[in-house]
Image: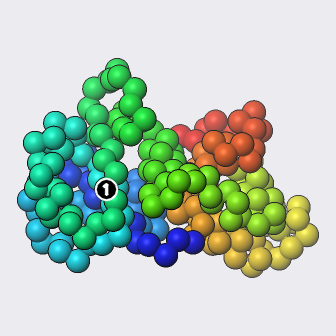
Amino acid sequence: MSSHSNHVIVICNSDIILKGLADILNDCLSNEVLLLHKTNELIDYPHLSGYVLLIMPLIEFKEDESFLKQALNNINEIKHVQLIYAEKPEVASLAINIFDNSAFIITKINELLNSLGSKNVDKTINELTRREIDVLQLLAKGLANKEIADKLCISIHTVISHRKNISEKTGIKSASGLTMYAVLKKIVDIDEISTSDLI
């Protein structure tokens, strides 16, 4: 694991969007998620340091850019992720849309978090042990902990321990988020999983 601290900050004046993103991200990220209605609320968090993933609409980011740099002056790197409300927007690599499903949002945010402070976005795949990859493959195929234990001839406690390690290394807690991660990293083929697991 990297030694730097990552923070996810969502700035949006809509309580519904803030609450929805908080539910999705807190469920699956090991990082602290900070929810703010307005950019100037950042003055209450002078302790922030390390790396920040900032999720907010582009227009507000441009308006408040100089204030953001001043408020986050202890931050090593800031990555802005556009928050888009349009149903059919132009596709941007650093964007999430309120119409995206939760597994897609989680995977995208985790990939961006993993890329902060590093040129290698895929470093987590190299950090997983062979056994952790085996567990992740079976988990992505929809097997329960007991079934994974039986299949790999290990104890259920060992499976739980592997799952904990996988979540720590990837930053993803939920089974649906890990399944999406496994597909994107080509650990499993999409044909081997039930698409209902990704919803």
Q: Is residue 162 above or below residue 125?
A: below
Q: Where residue 187 sits: x, y (%)?
A: 74, 47
Q: Is residue 74 above or below residue 196?
A: below
Rendered image quadrant of residue 72: bottom left
Amino acid type for the residue under numbered disc 1: Ile
Q: Nearer the viewer, residue 158 or 4?
A: 4
Q: In this figure, what is the number of numbered marks?
A: 1
Position of residue 117 in the picture relative to residue 40 (left or right): right
Q: Is residue 120 visible?
A: yes
The residue identified by callout 1 is 78
Q: Quadrant of the N terminus?
A: bottom right
Q: Where residue 6 sits: x, y (%)?
A: 39, 66
Q: Where residue 76 sits: x, y (%)?
A: 33, 65
Q: Is residue 22 visible?
A: no
Position of residue 161 in the picture relative to residue 47 (left or right): right
Q: Nearer the viewer, residue 185 or 15?
A: 185
Q: Is residue 41 above or below residue 162?
A: above
Q: Residues within 10 Å of mark 1 (few under 14, many from 20)?
A: some
Q: Where residue 184 sits: x, y (%)?
A: 63, 42
